[in-house]
Amino acid sequence: MDIIYCKMGTSGGVKEGPFEVALIEGAITESWQVDELKRIREVSRFLIPIGSCAVNGGIPAIKDIYPEIEVEKRVYQDLSVIHSVKAHPIDEYVRVDGYVRGCPMGERDLLELLTSLLLNTKPSFPE
């Protein structure tokens, strides 16, 4: 397996695709990330959000209970450089092919999902 893009570990390659499996971690919090996510979906056979932030918005979604501008004013001095969006689950932006929940996500769950995708079988997650 080649890891094409990962801030914490990379085995090289380019980010254009096509990709067999795209694992998306973290919440989408800026408008450019929505565009990048949609582009990745177009060139990926499977797209899987991994971890609570990608699956359901996680901690970044806490800010969503307040008006966006109110939150931004509390954090940033110069609002002209901010292009944030509410932290929704990944599946509100693109079609997904499965989920690996948890914070941190379960290693066994990730391996089970990847194996099932490659073998074209239904994943079996422990209760």
Image (cartoon, rainbow, N blue to C red):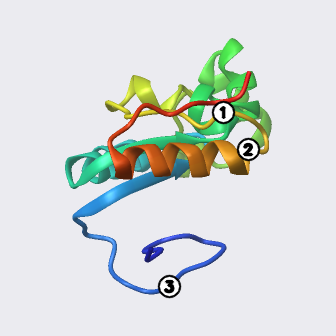
- Mark 2 or mark 3: which comes first in sequence? 3
Query: How many numbered tags mark residues here?
Result: 3
Q: Tell me the kind of residue under disc 3.
A: Ser
- Check the image and report above or below for 3 versus 123: below
Q: Which numbered marker is on residue 116?
A: none
Q: Tell me the kind of residue under disc 1.
A: Arg
Q: Residue at x 33, y 32 (%)?
A: 94
Q: Tell me the kind of residue under disc 2.
A: Gly
In front: 113, or 54?
113
Give the spatial CA distance, label 1 vs label 3.
25 Å
Q: Which residue is mark 2?
A: 106
Give the spatial CA distance, label 1 vs label 2.
7 Å
Please state the horizontal and vertical placement of residue 42, each as a whole percent of the image.
20, 48
**SS class of the residue under badge 1?**
loop
Q: Which quadrant holds the C terminus?
A: top right
Please state the horizontal and vertical placement of residue 47, each as a whole percent of the image.
38, 44
Q: Residues within 10 Å of mark 1 (few under 14, many from 20)?
A: some
Quadrant of res 92? top left
In front: 103, or 109?
109
* Residue 30 visible in image: no
Please state the horizontal and vertical placement of residue 3, each as a whole percent of the image.
48, 74
Q: Nearer the viewer, mark 1 or mark 2?
A: 2
Q: Residues within 10 Å of mark 2 (few under 14, many from 20)?
A: some
Q: Which quadrant holds the N terminus?
A: bottom left
Q: Which residue is mark 1?
A: 101
**SS class of the residue under badge 3?**
loop
Say whether residue 58 is left or right of residue 80: right
Q: Residues within 10 Å of mark 3 (few under 14, many from 20)?
A: few
Contact, mark 1 vs mark 2 (Cβ under 8 Å): yes
Q: Which residue is mark 3?
A: 11
Please state the horizontal and vertical placement of residue 99, each as a whole percent of the image.
53, 33
Say whether residue 79 is left or right of residue 38: right
